[in-house]
Image (cartoon, helix red, strand yellow):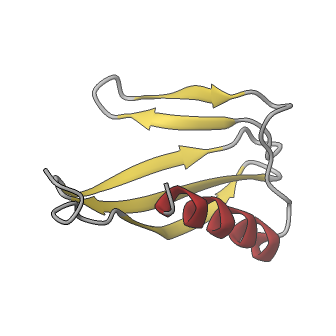
Amino acid sequence: MTSAQTEQTEAKMTSIQRYGEAGWAWTVTVTDEYGTSQVHYRTNRAGKGLWLYYGGAGEYRQQSGTSQFSLPRSEERARAKLAKQIASYRER
């Protein structure tokens, strides 16, 4: 596929909800040349670490440690941080 034919990947956070006392679970909808899929993430109950849901295994698996990733307790600030990360993903 030439660069002129390359389709742009779109990623958008479609939901976010509290997980535990200070953690978050959220879904990102990704659309690319292969179609549209939903990717499910979460932190631990304290808002630290990053887990990705593996549907085939039916479980979340840790992607980043609690020292490498965290989200603020405030939903507004958590959304803002995730929006920045999703935007940087789209620019790759």
Q: Give how far across and how far down residue 40 sits, in percent.
A: 46, 48
Q: Nearer the viewer, residue 59 or 27?
A: 27
Q: Is 45 positioned to the left or the right of 27 in the image?
A: right
Q: Residue at point 56% right, 62% down?
A: 86
Q: Vertically, is 79 above or below 54?
A: below
Q: Residue at point 61% right, 45% down?
A: 42
Residue 2 is drawn in which quadrant?
bottom left
Q: Is 53 positioned to the left or the right of 1 in the image?
A: right
* Number of dots carrying numbers: 0
Q: Vertically, is 14 above or below 45?
A: below
Q: Give how far across and how far down residue 70 sits, in percent.
A: 80, 46
Q: Nearer the viewer, residue 83 or 41?
A: 83
Q: Give how far across and how far down residue 46 sits, in percent.
A: 83, 43
Q: Give how far across and how far down residue 81 sits, in percent.
A: 74, 64
Q: Residue at point 55% right, 57% down?
A: 26
Q: Is 66 positioned to the left or the right of 87 in the image?
A: right
